């Protein structure tokens, strides 16, 4: 997320770098009500981050939701095509 949120035109990546996007990860323990509070927070965070990533990359929200459902790896060129970065330093 941090990489995608840079100023457009100034988001760079090295040629051998990789990017991985995924949904938020968390854990909870305790009473059922405490677990429910944590689950709601994680879902809220997931929705906010997916919206941010869609806006920054130009991808449709539905595509970002699909791609972040599990670990989604990209090499430098794929990250540029996806819209996370603007240029691969060669």
Image: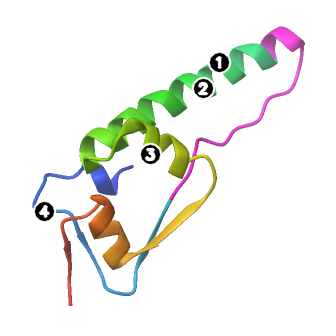
Which disc number belongs to residue 43? Answer: 2
> Spatial distance from mark 2 to mark 4, Cα to Cα?
30 Å
Q: In what element is the residue under mark 2? A: helix
Q: In what element is the residue under mark 3? A: helix
Name the spot of residue 37 as percent of width and height, x first.
Answer: 70, 14
Compared to residue 32, the image places residue 63 above or below, namely below
Can you name the residue that lies furthest to the bottom here?
A: 90
The span shown in magenta is 21-34
- Reading the image, the residue beneath label 1 is 40
Decide: marks 3, 1 in contact (CB < 8 A)?
A: no
> Spatial distance from mark 3 to mark 1, Cα to Cα?
22 Å
Can you name the residue that lies furthest to the top here?
A: 33
Can you name the residue that lies furthest to the right here?
A: 31
Left or right: where does residue 50 sit relative to residue 32? left
> Spatial distance from mark 4 to mark 3, Cα to Cα?
24 Å
Left or right: where does residue 66 sit relative to residue 2? right
Decide: marks 2, 1 in contact (CB < 8 A)?
A: yes
């Amino acid at each position: 997320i941090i990489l995608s949120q840079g100023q457009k035109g100034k988001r760079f990546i090295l040629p051998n770098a990789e990017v991985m996007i995924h949904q938020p990860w968390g854990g909870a323990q305790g009473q059922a009500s405490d677990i429910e509070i944590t689950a709601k927070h994680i879902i809220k965070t997931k929705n906010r981050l997916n919206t941010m990533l869609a806006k920054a990359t130009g991808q449709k929200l539905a595509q970002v939701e699909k791609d972040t459902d599990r670990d989604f790896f990209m090499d430098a060129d794929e990250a540029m095509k996806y819209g996370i970065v603007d240029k691969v330093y060669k």
